[in-house]
Image (cartoon, grey):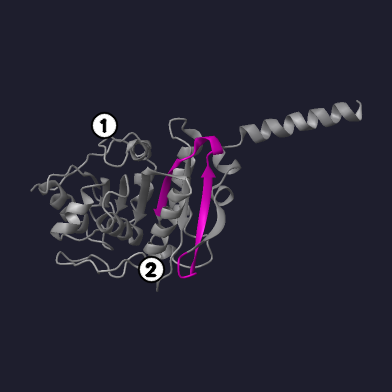
Amino acid sequence: MSLRLRLSLCLTVFFGLVTAMPLQAQFSIQEMFVPAAITNHMNETMPVRVWRNYQKRDLPVPVVVMLHGSGECGQENAKQLPPFAPIHRQALIDEDIPPALYLVPQCTQRNAWVRTIAFKEDYRAPRYPAPALRTVKEYLDQLVAEGIADPDRLYIVGLSLGGFGAWDAIQRWPNYFAAAVPICSGGSLQEEQIKNALTTSVWVFHGEKDVNVPVACSRRMVAAMTKAGGSPKYTEYPNAGHNVWTRALQDRAVVKWLFRQKRGKAASEPSESTGVWGRIKAYVTPQ
């Protein structure tokens, strides 16, 4: 057998094996989300992982900001990625998901997404945002100004500590985000803040038996928004604990719903959840 023929056969076998490998193995979130840094107006930097899943011709594109929980706080710019791997996998294999820019910034324990946690019913939002959240907002403003981000398709997803950040963002900057997915978290029940939250499409998730963040935090937010005339979506997982974000973000219906939302326009509701976890009954707190 000639050297050229042997080389051809080897390459054929090699590429055949690569093609057969799962997408998760070929394109992991650690590989696709490149490390970078955000610099704010005070010249302070924040670690961020970025996935530019688009071509220049697609601009401006939707932007998905994903805020991690307290367990992923740090400055090494790595451990905030794994919780959001389900979104990455869906974007790789689902042709219905449009080209987009994905951002996973990383805050520290001392400079978290929120100044205080909205655990109690009488929680009052601080006058100013946490510096970390403000830095993310400044970066989004910059992306919009540069024509990269579509201002009508800015999305924010947050889990636990990041969920509190997502609530704070949509209550602090009304009519800015098209949609939010706050998971196992809560926000302010103040009238103005609830009114602000109504300008964003919201799908809330929580585990019934969460001992880290009481399920009442999500229930009362949904109840307040519903009472104020809103139509938030709420999924509560029976007998589930705190880390329900894996179940929520693995649901194909959730990510597809997210990308259907546009600022100021209510999108049609998706069918019941169809993810690997099966059919989940949505639960909305009665008024």
At x 41%, y 54%, the residue is: 141
User: What amino acid is labelled 1 in the image?
Assistant: Ser
Question: Which residue is at the front of the view, 244 or 165?
Answer: 165
Q: Which mark is residue 111?
A: none
Residue at numbered disc 2: 131
Quarter-of-image position of residue 274: top left
Q: What secondary structure is marked by label 2?
A: helix
Give residue 135's position: percent from left, percent from top: 42, 63
Residue 55 visible within the image = no
Question: Which residue is at the front of the view, 22 or 271?
Answer: 271
Question: Which residue is at the front of the view, 25 or 188?
Answer: 188
Magenta segment: does it hold 139? no
**Vertical relation: 247 (above or below) 21:** below
Quarter-of-image position of residue 55: top right
Q: What secondary structure is marked by label 1?
A: loop
At x 59%, y 49%, the residue is: 31
Residue 138 visible within the image = yes
State the separation of the CA atoms marked 2 and 1. Answer: 35 Å
Is tag 2's residue or tag 1's residue first in the polypeptide sequence?
2
The magenta span reads 40-66
Magenta segment: does it hold 65? yes
At x 73%, y 31%, the residue is: 13
User: What amino acid is labelled 2 in the image?
Assistant: Pro
Question: Which residue is at the front of the view, 180 or 19?
Answer: 180
The N terminus - image quarter: top right
Give residue 105's position: percent from left, percent from top: 46, 58
Quarter-of-image position of residue 142: bottom left
Q: Which mark is residue 268?
A: 1
